[in-house]
Image (spheres, rainbow, N blue to C red):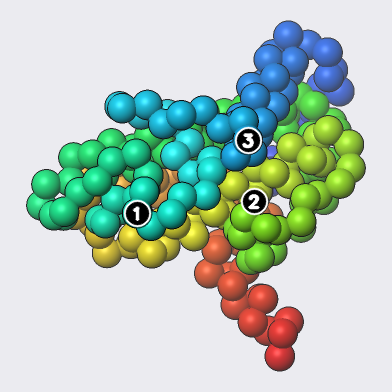
Amino acid sequence: MADSSPNSSIAPSNDPHSNEVLAALGALLKAVQEMNPAHARPIPPHPVRFNLLSRPSRSAQTCRICNFPGHHGDSIHYAGACKAAMVSMVGFWEDIAAHLALLYREHQLFQTAIKNNKPTYDMRLDNAPAIAGNMETVLVGRLTRSYLKFQSHCSGLRPKLLHILSEGDKHRYCAITNTLNDFLLNGSTLTELFERSLAERQ
């Protein structure tokens, strides 16, 4: 990963009031607010870099192929809308990752929140308890929950993704997964969190 990753030795600038930091914090605050079902925006007809999992959806409201809301499909061989939905989600998380990288590099409190983040497998659930703390801690906790929900959704689509996504789209998905696993999961994967959860319950 680039030098802005959690594994980097670059020290932050300690300037939480720079225009870039304020803009990134504002973007993440807006994204997190819209992850609340009460504040989630309606799904557009042609989503682009849009979080389609911001509110719970009943099975009747989701696609039979990809399980994303906002469209319906009957065949994996005609899954253009499914591809658009998945690419929209990847783009949304690419934008989030860019803000995370900047804040990790430039904002000490945000870097601390990421280092102290303790992701669990149960955080993927809609009823997972909220993380308390300062603004940075709350942001990181809420983003972690939403990211785990996205990865949990994708884990059930893994065989279908091979047919739905192009090679370039698959590369983007893998790249953003690696980046956000570093930032939000302390370098772990969803599978590793699941295995850790099982071990702790035994």
* Disc 2 target residue: 145
Q: Position of residue 142 (x, y in %)?
A: 70, 44
Farthest residue, direction top: 19
Q: Residues within 10 Å of mark 1 (few under 14, many from 20)?
A: few
Q: Between residue 87 and residue 42, name the one nearer to us.
A: 42
Say which residue appears at 42% left-offset and 62% top-offset: 155
Marks 1 and 3: in contact by CB < 8 Å?
no
Q: Is residue 76 above or below residue 108?
A: below
Q: Nearer the viewer, mark 2 or mark 3?
A: 3
Determine the secondary structure under disc 3: loop
Count of labels shown?
Answer: 3
In the displayed structure, does residue 45 sit left or right of residue 55?
Answer: left
- Amino acid at pointer 1: Ala
Q: Position of residue 2 (x, y in %)?
A: 57, 36
Q: Residues within 10 Å of mark 2 (few under 14, many from 20)?
A: many
Say which residue appears at 73% left-offset and 46% top-offset: 141
Farthest residue, direction right: 133
User: In the picture, which quadrant includes the N terminus?
Assistant: top right
Say which residue appears at 65% left-offset and 42% top-offset: 143
* Disc 1 target residue: 60
* Disc 3 target residue: 38
The span from disc 2 to disc 3 (Cα, nearest Å) is 17 Å
In the displayed structure, does residue 19 sit left or right of residue 69?
Answer: right
Q: Quadrant of residue 8?
A: top right
Marks 1 and 2: in contact by CB < 8 Å?
no
Q: Is residue 154 above or below residue 180?
A: below
Q: Is residue 168 visible?
A: no
Q: Earlier in the sequence, mark 3 or mark 1?
A: 3
- Amino acid at pointer 3: Ala
Q: Earlier in the sequence, mark 2 or mark 3?
A: 3
Determine the secondary structure under disc 2: helix
Residue 15 is tagged as none
